[in-house]
Image (tube, rainbow, N blue to C red):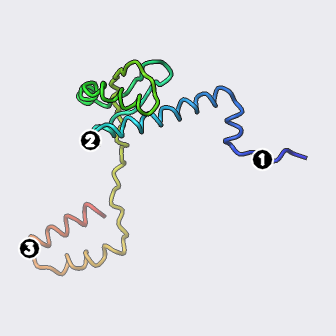
Amino acid sequence: MPPSPQPLSRILAADATIAAWDARRRREEVLTQLVRRYLPRALAARVRAADVDGAELTLLAEAGAIAAIVRQRTPDLLIALRNDGWQFSGIRMRVQVRNDPVPAQKPVGIQPNRDALKPLAELARGLPVSPLKRSLERLLRKIG
């Protein structure tokens, strides 16, 4: 009889390496939320905790200007983190520019239905010589 299926969380927790990675990720998430609580909203979304294993906390910023502003606030951040039970000797800032490329979108060509063009063609044939007639004929040539 095959063994019953186990939840993925139990399987991942059984592997020591993956469990350690998950624990680190959770610590980083907790610290990121704490740091963001003590920063202005405009800065908070652009800063995250990266390395929380040592005595020094490493924060990542999306730009050098953001890192400079956060660096000026490190004494206040250290005090706030100590009040929350985290004992760090210092905060180190790193800039990690995120370059999320915009996915290239393939241009969608106009693929008209031939039956939908018939009324336009009839209209163009029935019009007297005019700019409208020339425009409709040119449009029909391009599309058709």
Name the element at disc 1.
loop
Question: Residue beneath label 3, please?
Answer: 130
Q: Where is residue 127, by image quadrant?
A: bottom left
**Local SS, label 2:** helix
- The mark lying in front, picked from 3 and 2, is 2
Q: At 37% from the left edge and 43% from the top edge, which residue is drawn?
A: 103
Label 3, label 2: how far apart the Cα atoms are: 57 Å
Q: Is residue 130 left or right of residue 6?
A: left
Q: Residues within 10 Å of mark 3 (few under 14, many from 20)?
A: few
Q: Looking at this view, is 63 or 123 the one in front?
A: 63
Residue under numbered circle 1: 5
Q: Residue furthest bottom?
A: 126
Q: CA distance from mark 1 to mark 3?
A: 75 Å
Which of the two labelled residues, at mark 2 and mark 1, occupies the earlier sequence position? 1
Badge 1 or badge 3: first in the primary sequence: 1
Identify the residue at image location x=47%, y=36%: 29
Q: What SS does tag 3 mark?
A: loop
Q: Position of residue 73 (x, y in %)?
A: 27, 28
Question: What residue is rendered at 39% in x and 33% in y?
Answer: 48
